[in-house]
Amino acid sequence: MFNQIKNQFAEFVLSKPRKTILDFETPLVRLETLSKKLNIDLWMKRDDLAGPSFGGNKVRQLEYYLGEACSQNADTILITGAVQSNFVRLAAASAVRFGMKSIVQLEQRVSKQDNNYNHSGNVLLNNLLGAEIIHYPEGEDEEGADRALYVLAEKLKKEGKNPYVIPLSRNKPPLGALGYYRCAEEIVGQQDSTFDYLIVASGSGATHLGLVAGMSLLSPSTKVIGSCVRRDEEMQTERFRLLCELINSFSGCPNFLTEQDIFLWDKALEPGYGQIGPLAQNAMKLMAQNEGHLLDPVYTAKSFAAVPGLISDGIIGAGSRVLYVHTGGNAAIFAYQNEIQKIMKK
Ligand SMILES: Cc1ncc(COP(=O)(O)O)c(C=O)c1O
């Protein structure tokens, strides 16, 4: 049964159109100082280096969306996300590569009015990349935000354009997750021995889902833990359960992922999406001041906080071999400069 699912899932991934945007393997590096400090064997997958325009995890997901868009001869990419969305910025950069226009819809997910948040970081880069920026007033209405894009797509079709919508809502097939199944293959090819734990951000859940799918087939003794960056553990568990069902039916492997594959940790999420609580602040400092690597306040500070957090919770034991997947997001640091300056003064 296991080998049948393994082969069937690998064939399913190969059957989907993909456009190469990331043309190298991202490095797997050992974090020497933090390994000593935390008393574990800590490694980091540098997916912050993946792809153009400061890179990030969404590039591997976009390889599949752009693959589908190109197979439909699309000329315009439509995407929605938070004002400081890295996904939107990377979609704009990737669209350029394939000669497409991009229209990016920015949602008010965070009640912040400052100039840096609204104009610097990823917003500045969207402009530089030539994206057309439109706005959506809600931040917690995924279906509504998608609907607005589909309405716009219909209008563009009437004008003779061929638009492609990258959907956000959780009931669409999780195509982007396939990029992280491929990342799991890459990790397994790079590792010299098996990791006990893999820690990654869980937002839309696509990165986490792809890694769970990949590691459960290719390195089954590695426990993949998603650190919640968008919703609390209860809500993210519900979302992830649905994503598991979707990928099972999408791939034609109905008995593949189950409840047993879901591990989430949400203690660094507070006080909420896009806001930096104490555990995330400590994580940013811990990484910057011991390893010289940067974490962003929205995603990676929260996901990395799970490493010391799970050690204090007694889940990750001394000497464990741990892989942290750095998913990028550094462009947003400049949008949060006021908050970061305050943290540094503490
Ligand atoms: C830098 C960064 N890390 C992690 C995530 C979460 O990834 P996912 O939405 O696939 O769960 C995002 C999502 O936008 C992101 O931009």
Image (cartoon, rainbow, N blue to C red):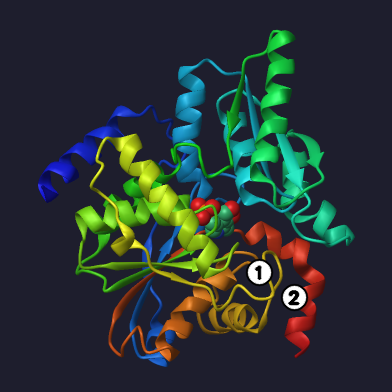
* Rendering coords of residue 286 (x, y %): 56, 84
* Rendering coords of residue 262 (x, y %): 37, 63
CA gap between label 1 and label 2 equals: 8 Å
Q: Are marks 1 and 2 in contact (CB under 8 Å)?
A: yes
Q: Amino acid at mark 1?
A: Pro
Say whether mark 2 is within 8 Å of ligand 1.
Answer: no
Q: Quadrant of residue 14?
A: top left
Dot 2: what SS? Answer: helix
Q: Quadrant of the C terminus?
A: bottom right
* Rendering coords of residue 43 (x, y %): 36, 72
Q: Nearer the viewer, residue 73 or 275?
A: 275
At x 88%, y 62%, the residue is 114
Residue density around tag 2, few if under 14, some if 14–19, many if 20 or more, within 10 Å? some
Residue 42 visible here:
yes
Dot 1: what SS? Answer: loop
At x 31%, y 90%, the residue is 318
Residue density around tag 1, few if under 14, some if 14–19, many if 20 or more, within 10 Å? many
* Rendering coords of residue 235 (x, y %): 54, 62
Can you tell me which quadrant of the image ligand 1 is in? bottom right
Q: Quadrant of residue 197?
A: bottom left
227 to the left or right of 289: left
- Give the numbered dot on residue 340: 2
| Residue topped by disc 1 | 297
Q: Amino acid at mark 2?
A: Ile
Residue 54 sits above or below residue 252 on the image? below
Residue 102 visible here:
no
At x 53%, y 45%, the residue is 170
